[in-house]
Image (spheres, grey):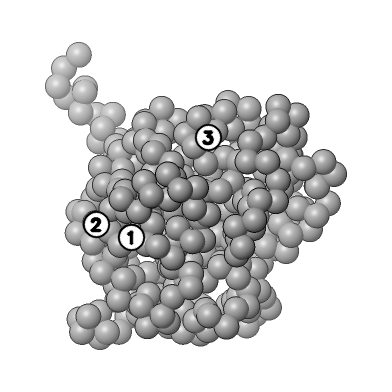
């Protein structure tokens, strides 16, 4: 094969690859629909737009206005668009469909109304998010795995049929799908047509997983990205002492790039080389935090990702002079 023919597929991949960078309420310390320790939603929208991001996730349902007309006006006035809504699921439990579908339906309807394309689906954690108390066993039985896989296939198909959206399953720390072995089992037991993966680079690295390996071995399953880094020293302590995820966040387990792992430029390059067309939403778990903290981190992260120099990055530009003042 000639050098020219070798170059042709790569060129075609670069033409099709598109990585749309955005951010989310999570990067502003928002974990709940309403919490006095969180920044008001108006401030989040002002600041995420001011950093230059054009795409956002909705965050916890009820944090942003749920009336489509009002939310649409708020977004349009700040030149923002929605990539996805987010919801937690517990389909591994018996008789859980109606409860999960009720929550997903609300999120999917608002996402659809806002022109979004995805619903990011996160497995419920096995211990309480605030107290750390164990709520159920940390490992799923084979029966529970079967319920989870069948339920996610059904959920992905229903969201496509009812709302014209894709789900993206998000492995998460302190959930039953966190370690790479869990992710690989989940992918093996679910239908690629209905269940793409939301690869959260920080949560994979939290448990020592290999993001590049997952991207290269499962390119057809990478439907969405969350860009995040962890501090290896903090995570080593967290795992050694079995510290719950919320306390790990307070200890600084999630860190500002480029100071942690995984190294983001090679991951973005791998996505580009594969010709993937995805949203890549920046997240930085901060709950709870000083309300003045997130904006500076978000500005610097926006600059850092923009400096990666990939042709396929769509990152947007700052809308205020605050970027230059940081």
| Relative to 268, 169 lies left or right | right
Residue at x 66% of width, y 51% of height: 134
Residue at x 21% of width, y 22% of height: 5
Looking at the image, residue 266 lies above or below residue 308:
above
Residue at x 63% of width, y 73% of height: 33
Which residue was labeled with disc 3?
A: 183
Q: Nearer the viewer, residue 267 or 250?
A: 250
- Which x, y percent locates residue 224? 47, 48
Which residue was labeled with disc 2?
A: 259
Residue at x 34% of width, y 41% of height: 271
**Cα gap from disc 3 to disc 2, whole angstroms:** 25 Å
Residue at disc 3, secondary structure: helix
Q: Quadrant of the C terminus?
A: bottom left
Q: Are marks 1 and 2 in contact (CB under 8 Å)?
A: yes
Q: Nearer the viewer, residue 76 or 256?
A: 256
Mark 1: few/some/many CA within 10 Å (<14, 14-19, 20+): many
Q: Quadrant of the N terminus?
A: top left
Residue 252 visible somewhere in the drawing: yes
The residue most toward the left is 3
Mark 3: few/some/many CA within 10 Å (<14, 14-19, 20+): many
Which residue was labeled with disc 1?
A: 255
Mark 3 vs mark 2, foreground winner is 2
The residue most toward the top is 1
Residue at disc 2, secondary structure: loop
**Cα gap from disc 1 to disc 2, whole angstroms:** 7 Å
| Relative to 93, 304 lies left or right | left
Q: Choose top left, top right, bottom left or bottom right for residue 290.
A: bottom left
Q: Choose top left, top right, bottom left or bottom right for residue 14.
A: top left
Looking at the image, residue 191 lies above or below residue 265:
above
């Amino acid at each position: 094969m000639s050098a020219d023919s070798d170059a042709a597929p790569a060129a075609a991949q670069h033409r099709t690859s598109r990585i749309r960078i955005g951010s989310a309420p999570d990067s502003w310390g928002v974990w709940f629909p309403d919490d006095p320790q969180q920044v008001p939603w108006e401030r989040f929208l002002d600041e995420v737009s001011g950093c230059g991001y054009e795409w956002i996730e909705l965050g916890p349902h009820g944090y942003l206005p749920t009336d489509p007309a009002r939310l649409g006006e708020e977004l349009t006035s700040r030149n923002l668009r929605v990539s996805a809504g987010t919801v937690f699921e517990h389909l591994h439990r018996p008789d859980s469909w109606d409860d999960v579908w009720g929550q997903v339906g609300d999120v999917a309807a608002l996402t659809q109304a806002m022109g979004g394309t995805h619903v990011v689906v996160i497995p419920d954690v096995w211990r309480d998010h605030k107290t750390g108390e164990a709520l159920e066993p940390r490992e799923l039985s084979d029966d529970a795995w079967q319920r989870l896989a069948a339920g996610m296939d059904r959920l992905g198909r229903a969201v496509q049929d009812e709302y014209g959206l894709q789900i993206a399953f998000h492995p998460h720390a302190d959930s039953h799908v966190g370690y790479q072995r869990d992710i690989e089992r989940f992918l093996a037991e679910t239908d690629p047509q209905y269940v793409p993966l939301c690869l959260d680079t920080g949560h994979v690295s939290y448990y020592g997983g290999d993001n590049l390996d997952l991207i290269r071995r499962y390119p057809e399953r990478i439907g969405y990205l969350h860009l995040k880094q962890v501090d290896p020293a903090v995570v080593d302590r967290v795992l050694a002492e079995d510290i719950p995820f919320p306390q790990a966040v307070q200890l600084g387990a999630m860190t500002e790039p480029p100071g942690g792992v995984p190294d983001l430029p090679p991951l973005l390059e791998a996505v580009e080389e594969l010709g993937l067309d995805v949203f890549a939403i920046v997240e930085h778990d901060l709950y709870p935090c000083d309300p003045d903290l997130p904006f500076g981190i978000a500005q610097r992260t926006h600059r850092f990702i923009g400096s990666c120099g990939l042709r396929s990055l769509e990152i947007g530009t700052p809308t205020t002079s605050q970027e230059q003042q940081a």
